[in-house]
C-alpha cells in the first residue's frame, strides 16, 4: 500500500505524524511528503489554530478531493486539530473524505489500516526532518486558559510524557544520527507538574544531554508565568543546551495581558527578560506578539512598540488577533479593532523588528561560529549555529569553494548533517554569509 502523509501546522503535528508512520511502516510504502506519485491513501494531518491555518487545511483537503476524482488518490484520511475541532461539520461538508479522526485518535487511525497499535514502537519515528535534527514533544495539551487560544479545547489538558520514555525516544533518534533536539510542547515549562508534582524541564534536559550523539538541544514554546529558573542554570552551564529560548510573550500592556488571561504583568515580563539576559549572557530570545487584541488601544500599542525597542529581541514574529469560536475572548470581548488597523499595527511592529534583527545580525560579522550543515544546494551550504532554530529562523550561507583546502577531496553532499567552523563575513535582516574555516 502506497501512502503519503501531508502535515500542516506546527512541529508538534509533525511529531504526531512521525509516530503514526512508524506504526504503519510494516504494511505501507511511505512516499515523501513532496512526492507527486499516485497513492493508495493520502493522510492529512490538519491544523485548526487560527483562521489562516484552518483555511490552509481545508484547501489541502479540497485539493486532495480533486486528485481523488482524477483517480490519483485511492482514499483520503484526515486527522488532527481541524477535524477534532469540527468533528460534526466537516464530514457533512466534505463527504468525499473516507475517514475522519481527531487530534488524539491515533489508535483508531492505526486500526483503520487493519493494524493493532504496537506499544513497543511508541518510541519509534519515521523522521520527516533531515536526519541530523528532530523535534521532541515532551507533553501534550495545555492547562493554560489564554482567552484567545483554542488549543485546550482541541488538545485537552496537559499531559507530560514520562521522562524515561523521552530518554528512550531520544536515544533511538541519536542512534539514527540525530545530533540536535528541539524540545517542544504547548508549554515546555509546565513539564512534569502532573507526573512529578514539580517542574522538571531542567532535570529532563540534564538526562537528555547524557545521551551519546546528542550535541545540541534548544527549547521552544515556554510560557513566561512561573518560569523555572533552573532551566536558565542548565542553559548557562550545560554546553549541550543552546543559549536560545522561544518564549511567546504576546503583549506587554497590563490591560491587554489581563484580557488575554496571561497571568503576568508587564513589569513581571520585563524582569524576566532582564533575568534571562543576566543569567545567560548572549542568549538569543525568540518571541511572538499579538496585535489588535481587545483592550489594545493606541496607548497599549505604543507601549508594545516601546517594549520591543527596549528588549531588542533577536527574533520576533507577530500576528493579528482573530476571534476563535469557543474561546473566552470570542464569547466575552468585542473585537473592536478593524482589520485594516490590525494590519497597519502589524506592519509597523514588523518594520521596527526588521531593523533590530538587522542590527543583531550585523553585530555578528567578524565572529567565528560553529554551525551544522542542513543541506547543500546550488553550490551553497545552508547552515545554522546554536542561535538559529530550523524552519523558523534565518540561515547561515557558506559558498562551496572546491579549491579551498578545507574541502579538498570531499564530496560536499557528504557534509550534510556535519559540523563546521565558519567566520561570519556578511549579514542582512534574515540570513548571514560566512566562509568555511575548518570541519569537525
Image (cartoon, helix red, strand yellow):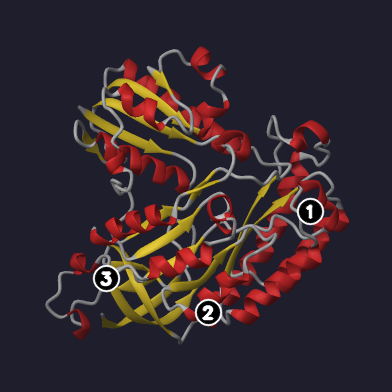
Position of residue 251 measured from the top left corner of the image (x, y, whole percent): 74, 57
Pointer 2 local density, CA inside 10 Å: few below 14, some 14–19, many at least 20: some
What's the distance in space between the residues labelled 1 and 3, CA to CA? Answer: 43 Å
Between 252 and 291, the one lying in front of the other is 252
Between 90 and 365, the one lying in front of the other is 90
- Give the residue pinned by disc 3: 418
Tag nearer the camera, 3 or 2: 2
Identify the mark nearer the N-term, 1 or 2: 2
Position of residue 385 measured from the top left corner of the image (x, y, whole percent): 42, 73
- Give the residue pinned by disc 1: 257
Identify the mark nearer the N-term, 1 or 3: 1
In the displayed structure image, the side of residue 271 where residue 359 appears, left or right: left
In the displayed structure image, the side of residue 299 where residue 20 appears, left or right: left
Pointer 3 local density, CA inside 10 Å: few below 14, some 14–19, many at least 20: some
Tag nearer the camera, 1 or 3: 1
Position of residue 439 measured from the top left corner of the image (x, y, whole percent): 25, 80
Element at label 2: helix
Residue at 81 percent of width and 42 percent of height? 337
- Give the residue pinned by disc 2: 236
Amino acid at each position: 500500500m502506497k501512502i503519503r502523509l501531508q502535515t500542516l501546522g506546527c512541529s508538534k503535528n509533525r511529531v504526531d505524524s512521525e509516530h503514526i508512520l512508524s506504526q504503519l511502516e510494516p504494511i505501507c510504502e511511505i512516499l515523501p511528503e513532496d512526492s507527486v506519485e499516485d497513492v493508495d491513501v493520502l493522510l492529512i494531518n490538519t491544523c485548526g489554530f487560527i483562521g489562516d491555518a484552518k483555511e490552509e487545511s481545508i484547501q489541502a483537503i479540497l485539493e486532495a478531493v480533486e486528485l481523488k476524482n482524477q483517480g490519483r488518490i485511492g482514499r483520503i484520511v484526515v486527522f488532527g486539530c481541524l477535524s477534532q475541532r469540527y468533528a460534526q461539520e466537516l464530514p457533512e461538508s466534505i463527504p468525499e473524505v473516507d475517514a475522519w479522526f481527531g487530534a488524539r485518535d491515533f489508535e483508531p487511525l492505526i486500526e483503520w489500516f487493519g493494524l493493532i497499535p504496537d506499544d513497543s514502537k511508541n518510541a519509534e519515528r519515521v523522521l520527516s526532518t533531515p536526519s541530523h535534527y528532530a523535534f521532541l514533544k515532551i507533553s501534550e495539551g495545555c492547562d493554560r486558559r489564554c482567552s484567545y487560544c483554542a488549543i485546550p479545547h482541541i488538545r485537552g489538558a496537559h499531559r507530560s510524557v514520562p521522562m524515561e520514555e523521552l530518554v528512550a525516544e531520544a536515544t533511538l533518534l541519536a542512534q539514527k544520527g540525530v545530533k540536535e533536539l528541539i524540545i517542544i510542547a504547548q508549554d515546555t515549562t509546565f513539564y512534569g507538574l502532573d507526573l512529578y508534582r514539580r517542574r522538571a524541564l531542567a532535570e529532563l534536559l540534564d538526562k537528555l544531554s547524557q545521551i551519546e550523539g546528542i550535541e545540541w538541544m534548544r527549547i521552544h514554546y515556554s510560557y513566561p508565568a512561573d518560569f523555572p529558573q533552573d532551566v536558565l542554570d542548565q542553559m548557562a552551564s550545560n554546553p549541550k543546551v543552546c543559549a536560545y529560548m522561544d518564549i511567546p510573550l504576546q503583549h506587554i500592556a497590563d490591560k491587554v495581558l489581563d484580557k488575554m488571561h496571561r497571568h503576568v504583568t508587564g513589569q513581571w515580563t520585563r524582569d524576566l527578560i532582564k533575568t534571562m539576559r543576566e543569567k545567560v549572557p548572549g542568549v538569543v530570545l525568540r518571541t511572538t506578539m499579538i496585535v489588535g487584541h481587545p483592550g489594545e488601544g493606541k496607548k497599549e500599542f505604543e507601549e508594545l512598540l516601546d517594549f520591543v525597542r527596549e528588549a531588542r529581541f533577536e527574533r520576533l514574529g507577530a500576528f493579528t488577533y482573530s476571534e476563535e469560536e469557543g474561546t473566552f475572548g470570542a464569547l466575552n470581548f468585542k473585537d473592536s479593532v478593524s482589520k485594516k488597523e490590525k494590519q497597519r499595527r502589524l506592519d509597523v511592529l514588523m518594520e521596527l523588528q526588521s531593523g533590530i534583527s538587522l542590527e543583531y545580525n550585523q553585530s555578528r560579522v567578524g565572529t567565528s561560529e560553529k554551525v551544522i550543515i542542513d543541506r547543500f544546494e546550488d553550490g551553497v551550504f545552508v547552515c545554522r549555529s546554536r542561535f538559529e532554530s530550523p524552519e523558523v529562523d534565518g540561515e547561515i550561507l557558506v559558498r562551496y569553494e572546491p579549491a579551498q583546502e578545507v574541502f579538498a577531496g570531499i564530496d560536499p553532499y557528504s557534509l550534510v548533517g556535519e559540523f563546521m567552523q565558519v567566520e561570519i563575513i556578511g549579514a542582512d535582516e534574515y540570513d548571514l554569509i560566512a566562509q568555511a574555516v575548518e570541519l569537525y
